[in-house]
Amino acid sequence: MLEAMEGPASTRGGGVAGVAPAAQALEEHVRSFERAFGRGGSVRAFFSPGRVNLMGAHLDYNGGPVMPMAIDRGTFLAVRERSDDQVRLRSTSEEGEFRFHLASPPASRAGRWSDYPSGVIRGLAVRGAGRGLEILFGGNLPVGAGLSSSASICVGTAFALDRVWDLGLGPHERVQAALDAERGFVGVLCGIMDPYAVGLARPGHLLWLDCKDASWEHLPIDPGVARVAVADTLVRRELAQGAFNQRVEEASLAFRGLRRHAPEATCLRDVGLEVLERHGGDLEPTLRARATHVLHEVRRTFQAREALLAGDLPSFGRRMLESHASLRDLYDVSVPELDCLVESAAAESGVLGARLTGAGFGGCAVILLERGAEPALDRVRERFARRFGREPRIELFGGDSGPRELATSES
């Protein structure tokens, strides 16, 4: 059997998807690998979590602080070395196979899911790896939901290559390899939050990450007191990359406009609120709105940190609700489905806070609630279904310990 891994809990009827279903799913993934690539040789299995961000929205590429948590749901990788230098990549969610040779890796992206692991392999192959690989990707993390499936894949690939090729990488080097692949090969103008949240995970903690200098620490959040739920709108974000890159550009333009009044600033996070109040009127209205969100979100995130350290979860939750309103009204990255989830959750007793998570434009909302208030999530689901004619997927998640190898029955 594979190493046991705690799974997510469903809110429907109180059922729990626990250790056995997760282990069974990973065993099935190894069997799927053998069906795809054939039996024989040593097949190694790996898991890489996704993440949910509770505070600090659209701050990572603006040099601000963020507070993500790795979740106990993610990407499965089954890997086998070859005798030559060919790489073969498959996914359980898509037909087809992507192939290349380590001696001539892809020079540009293909516009497919395989770009993410290909970018990591391309970057790490220069370290002297000589043998090709067969890799099957799968898992239980919805793609395009805002739970960082891309970082889960990239960090998971870096971890697996480190183990299989015996590269001797540390956690930060694996995180950097993932980040280089997304930025340099796939072309997403992402910040550092997602790979850090996946690669430096600790159960029962949020990761406090200052994206200006990459300093970080783990902040405890007691799962015996509070639960974290993720509500998936089922609105996918496949076409949102252009809109995300536009927000990055708008934030950059806002910084350029304000930097003349704050010459010591190195990123938008460094610009003081007093500078915005005095000179924000010089910016085009859209750029002023983007800067207003970023600078107030920085302050809110520090306030949320202090509330968490003081054990004041209601105050932490209020900062989450304020964050969502700002993302909706100033950063323009919400959609009606996300607003419905957040407003419905906020109306329930026992719900501490809620906000969209990830880049927005669809995907998921994160809900922080008191332990024992889980029935409120069924009412959130019902209100959403009445309005949109379909049920959102709402699940409770625990934390996760980060990427790891799992022992198979063949080990």
Image (cartoon, rainbow, N blue to C red):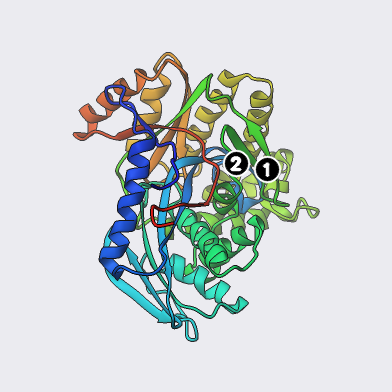
Q: Quadrant of residue 158?
A: bottom right
Residue farthest toward the right in the current orientation of the protein:
264
Q: Which residue is mark 2?
A: 292
Q: Residue at x 24, y 33 (%)?
A: 391
Residue 392, x across and y down, in percent = 28, 35
**Residue reaching furthest to the front:** 410
Observer-nearest of 111 and 246: 111
Q: Quadrant of the C terminus?
A: bottom left
**Number of dots carrying numbers:** 2
Q: Whole-percent x and y of residue 325?
A: 48, 32
Helix, strand or loop for disc 2: helix
Compared with 171, 1 (above or below) is above
Element under disc 1: helix
For this orientation, the residue located farthest to the bottom is: 103
Which comes sooner in the sequence, label 2 or label 1? 1
Residue occupying the point 51% across, 36% down = 399
Residue flagged by tag 2: what amino acid is it?
Thr
Query: Of residues 223 and 38, which is closer to you in this image?
Result: 38
User: Dot 1 corresponds to which residue?
Assistant: 276
Whether residues under marks 2 and 1 lie with C-beta atoms below 8 angstroms apart, the answer is yes
Amino acid of disc 1: Leu
